[in-house]
Image (cartoon, rainbow, N blue to C red):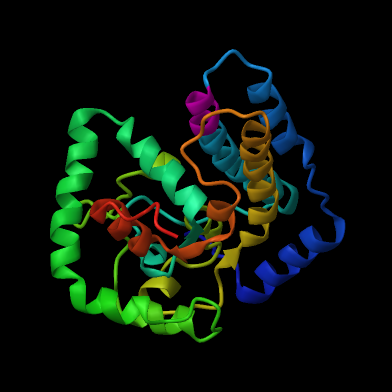
Amino acid sequence: MTRFLKHQEILNKCERINQDYEIDPGFFDRIVDDLLNSELDTEEVILEGFQSLLAEVDNEIERMESYSDMKPNCFKGCAFCCYFPIVVSRMEAKIMFRSIEQFSEERKNAIFRHWENYYKDQSGKLEKAFSMDPEDPQTKLAYKQLNLPCPMLDPETQLCMAYEVRPIPCRTYLNYSDPQVCAENHMPKEPFSYEFLYTYYFGAINELIQVLYENGEEIFIDYPMDAWSYDYLPAWVLKWREGTLNEI
């Protein structure tokens, strides 16, 4: 019989991480340095950097889990965290959409068809969601209670349709306790968030874009404005579909 960690046990392990574990920013820095010294063209540098830095967040979480002897109990097909508000910068949204455009024709067209239905079926919930202040501490619960799925969630398989480029909030919310707590609660206390890793990831991707910008490279990002403009992911998708993503 599987023994799940209790809430206090998770808190104790996380406290050990906070006190004793040191994050090495060099893992992120080396990705940036290697790409800037590569022979890849500018767009390839941006897209490769985006995916590599996102993947490094996963790697860092695994290192912390190994250090604290924790193993997540999240399972394929569980879409609990796909109903939370996902807030990203315009810069990240643009890179994400450009990455999706590089997917196979079949895969990206499936996403585009899904979005056609998504914005029709979820229009009422989206209107309520977009009216919520992402800075308000009460928003996370109110948004979750809308039962509004992420626009990247496949309603049939309950899997992410853009898994390798999913944003930081999707990667950093993990449950080390009984998975049932997610099924029974909008905001269970047991899951743990590593969202503090956003600082390391964003600092690195921002440095990458900044260097390219200052070197006079032609980039598809309005830097630095795009780096500091934030909104809900469904709002960015809608603007991308309407052709207004570049409007400030």
Residue drawn at x 55%, y 42% is: 54
In front: 52, or 202? 202
On screen, 12 above or below 240? below
Q: Is residue 169 magenta?
A: no
In front: 149, or 6? 149
Residue 226, x across and y down, in percent = 53, 53
Residue 118, x across and y down, in percent = 19, 61
Quadrant of the image occupied by residue 199: bottom right
On screen, 100 above or below 181? above
Residue 74, x across and y down, in percent = 45, 56
Quadrant of the image occupied by residue 68: bottom right
Residue drawn at x 31%, y 58% is: 239
Quadrant of the image occupied by residue 215: top right
> Would you say residue 156 is visible in this rendering?
no
Residue drawn at x 73%, y 63% is: 13
In front: 166, or 216? 216
Q: For the magenta stretch, what is the residue range? A: 42-48
